Image (cartoon, helix red, strand yellow):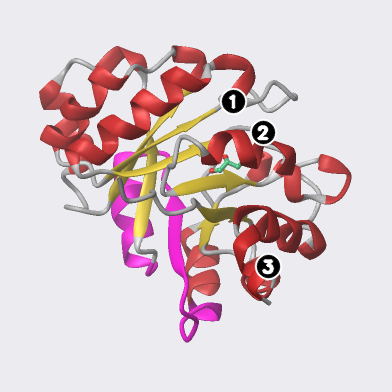
Amino acid sequence: MTPLPSPRLLVSVRDPAEAEAALLAGADLIDAKDPERGALGALDPSTVAEIMARLADANVETSAVADSGESLAAMARSGARWVKHGVGRAIWHDGAALARLAAPVPGRVIAVLFAEDEPRADLVPLLAEAGFAGAMIDTAGKAGVRLPDLLAPPELRAFVAACRASGLLCGLAGSLRITDIPALSAAAPDYLGFRGGLCRGFDRTNGIDPLRVAEAVRALRPQAQDAA
Ligand SMILES: O=C[C@H](O)COP(=O)(O)O
């Protein structure tokens, strides 16, 4: 059986300087998000455009958080490859509502589900059918409760497997620490998403610490260290 690839590193940033620092430290995907506005706070589209301009010549994936239907299109225009939007439990089984959320930016919207809502694998085909390009589990609370505290490994593995079976990009995030990487890598998501665990003092409203980003990269790609 072909081994699944190691997850890549998503780092959420709030400005061009953090974006460049995360890129230089080895991040695989730069995600534009406002940490001052909760778990899924959108930055001003002009700031997102500045971030994307700073990354224009880099070989890196990009995403931006949108917090409304209108901002979905604005974030897409900013140049981000993917646009992330929260999908609340209330519409999980409302196909029309899901499709409306994915429609403004066809093939580029990532559904973000909160672990506190206990998303299950059987939700994933509904997201694919509605037109989402991917699905990510994150935590709504950012006071220290981490994704592994809320969803057990079998649930995470089932969610990731469902994303693969439905052809959706898949990410896991939620107050993660670098020490969570080995266990979460076993679920083989496309991305593991970080902010707080890579910030100074583990405070997501502080700045990104490039040394922690580099440490997360090493933890994700230990074989690359061995080969070096
Ligand atoms: O999308 C990624 C996560 O929201 C990163 O934020 P966090 O590590 O502070 O939970």
Asked where in the image residue 184 lies, by quadrant, the reply is top right
Dot placed on the residue nearer the N-terminal end, 2 or 1? 1
Q: Which mark is residue 147?
A: 1
Residue named by callout 2: 175
Q: Which of 204 and 44 is in front in this view?
A: 204
Q: Is mark 1 within 8 Å of ligand 1?
A: no
Q: Which amino acid does label 1 sit on?
A: Leu
Circle 2: element type: loop
Dot placed on the residue nearer the N-terminal end, 1 or 3? 1
Q: Where is residue 89 in the image (x, y as percent from the top left)?
A: 34, 15
Picture quarter with the N terminus:
top left
- Ligand 1 is found in which quarter of the picture? top right
Picture quarter with the C terminus:
bottom right
Q: Where is residue 69 in the image (x, y as percent from the top left)?
A: 29, 41
User: Label 2 crowding class (10 Å Cα cut-off): few <14, some 14-19, many 20+?
Assistant: many
Q: Is mark 2 within 8 Å of ligand 1?
A: yes
* In the depicted structure, whether residue 44 falls above or below residue 124: below
